[in-house]
Amino acid sequence: MNRNFFHNKIKLFLQVAIILLIVILVFIGLVKKTSRVDFESVCPFGGLIALGSKFWLGSMSCAMSETQVFPGLMLVLGVILFAKLFCGYLCPLGTVTEWLNKLSARLKIGFVLRGIPDRLLRFGKYLLLFFTAYFTATSSELWCKKFDPYYAAVTGFGSDTILWVGILTILTVVVLSVIIRFFWCKYVCPLGALSNIFVNIFISLPLIVLYFALYFMGVKLHILWLILALCLSGALTEVFRFRFFSLSPFRIKVNRDTCTDCGECDDNCPQGIAVSQFKQVTHPDCTLCLDCLHGCSAGSLSMGKYKATWLPPVVLVALIGLGFLFARQFEFKTLSERWGNFHQLPSVQTYEMRDLASVKCWGSAKSLQNKLMKKKGIVGLDAYAKSHHIVIYYDSSRIDEYGLKKAVFSPYQYKIQKFDQYQPARIAVFEIPIQGLWDVRDNADLIRMLRVNPFIVGFETNFGEPVHAKIYLELDKVTPDSLIRIIEQKSYQKHNPDGKSEEVKVDFRCEGQGAFVDTLDYLTFRRNLFVGYDQTYNDYSKYRPENLRILEIGFPEAESIGARRSLKYLTSHVSFFDGTVRVRTAFTDRSVLQVYFDPRQVNAQQIQQKLFEKTLKILTSESETKEMDNPFEFVLPVKVYQVTPALFLTKKDLITE
């Protein structure tokens, strides 16, 4: 492999530009957490795979949208008309692998795998593509995030990755690809397999046309069969024919009349293709990177009848730009679901709601759907994550627009002050309707505005038009006029974690002057505004109250959003004791964690020891477990007492952040 980095300057420029852009964005995200880039949102492979989910389930995968789909489709067009240009010019994994290969060439430690081992290993990427496409299409979850080395690296092994798999794939790229030329790209990469399927268009297109023809004729074969047919056709053609049925006129050609058989083209090919042995290069690994052409001193190579060697990379950049341009003109439904008696209704009404910041991906849209399905009369939902708006389908004879708004609305409670140093004796409750207060983002803005006054201690919303807000104040410390002035200010300074601040414009309007409606003591206030966690398991409902006990221990971080999100791991950890049946948080005279248990099967000491273990053991499936560091800190003393019927039946609604 030629070690010269600079003979193909256009390719090098694009590769360096992409790597620098990624490094800069990661660095910005590290130093300024509010500016972190969602690398999933610019994944063309994810967009293409998500189309399967869109077709089969009617919903895009995760946060996938037209922003990923259209650039992905443009890449497919580039593959069909030219070659695997993305792999050769823009793919960050391909770039890193190529640079590492050049380093290994200097050290003389790498080699090109050939023959039967090479052919057999090529099945691997099609197998991985099959599982990626199938699980994504049937679950609306982007399955490749579990193992994608690029996603794992740029997100610092984000929550969607499986740690050991992410590490393994990164090692595959960094280590194996140094020893065996382009190991990841040739044998593992599902995007490489997908690209090869579209290069092989004369085989792939008839399969796609046949599947959809049967589908629209009423023969609705499972999408499994389309995915399987495409993966098999690509794998068998590559492994046994070792060249594709391509449409592209852009092929590297060798002029035998002028070729000196010097082997420069072979040395310059990063993929290790023996270019000199071809009259026209049809090798499945060719990405039309043109390194061989630029490295031929005899001038015996050409790109068919096309002399403009700048054409492939320029077209690639133009196609991607065109993809992003198209993405600005269209918006796909992130989720589109119908249920109940939708198809039996003589007429279905629709109601559109905008500026719902909480609708930001497939998961949040699915959560809203699950909530709306419990409301009689609502029979469908379309959600658009990009623009944060929804369309609700409903039966107007059973529910009106007021009921729809109420069904979407989520009441909110928040303790504004921490009370680390003091506890106010009495707290007044001030109630006032507020226009413009609806979504999670609105709540967050208003809380930041109220926090500037240390005597404003709590905030609560209930549905109404406008929304009814209860604001908790230290008695006789805040006047209604001063409170209204805070709420109706046109902007406020938001202080970011990096120490910098920004001006945020808001538009809240109070309706009327409001009124004081109640006063509370400190403990009652804390209990009223406590947002807890509650999870039952191990057949909790089959137990009688008199047979259960509660272990209660101090849990200062119980109201933390992060702690509530992570308590599912602690619940899984303690659930290995058959006798534990419920984990919840509450406020008694302090924030506590409560574990309900059957003393005939497990004792309080065993549970306490389990809570203080340094490592949590988590059940990930019926037979598989994983371990993580225990992030929780508990405060003694421990109390153990009898479960009463009231304690057994009382279960707060779970609040999903």
Image: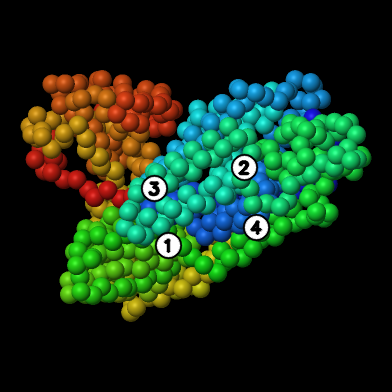
Q: Position of residue 574 (x, y in %)?
A: 28, 28
Q: Which residue occupies 73% across, 40% down?
A: 281
Question: Which residue was labeled with disc 2?
Answer: 244
What's the amino acid at mark 4?
Ile
Q: Which residue occupies 64% across, 29% down?
A: 183
Side of 393 relative to 214 (left or right): left
- Dot label at residue 223: 3
Q: Which residue occupies 53% across, 31% down?
A: 124
- Dot label at residue 320: 4
Q: Does the rendering let one see residue 99?
A: no
Secondary structure at numbered mark 3: helix
Going from N to C along the chain, the mark reached first, 1 or 4, is 4
Q: Nearer the viewer, mark 1 or mark 3?
A: 3
Spatial CA span between label 1 and label 4: 22 Å
Q: Residues within 10 Å of mark 1 (few under 14, many from 20)?
A: many
Question: Which residue was labeled with disc 1?
Answer: 333
What's the amino acid at mark 1?
Lys
> Who is closer to the viewer here, 147 or 180?
180
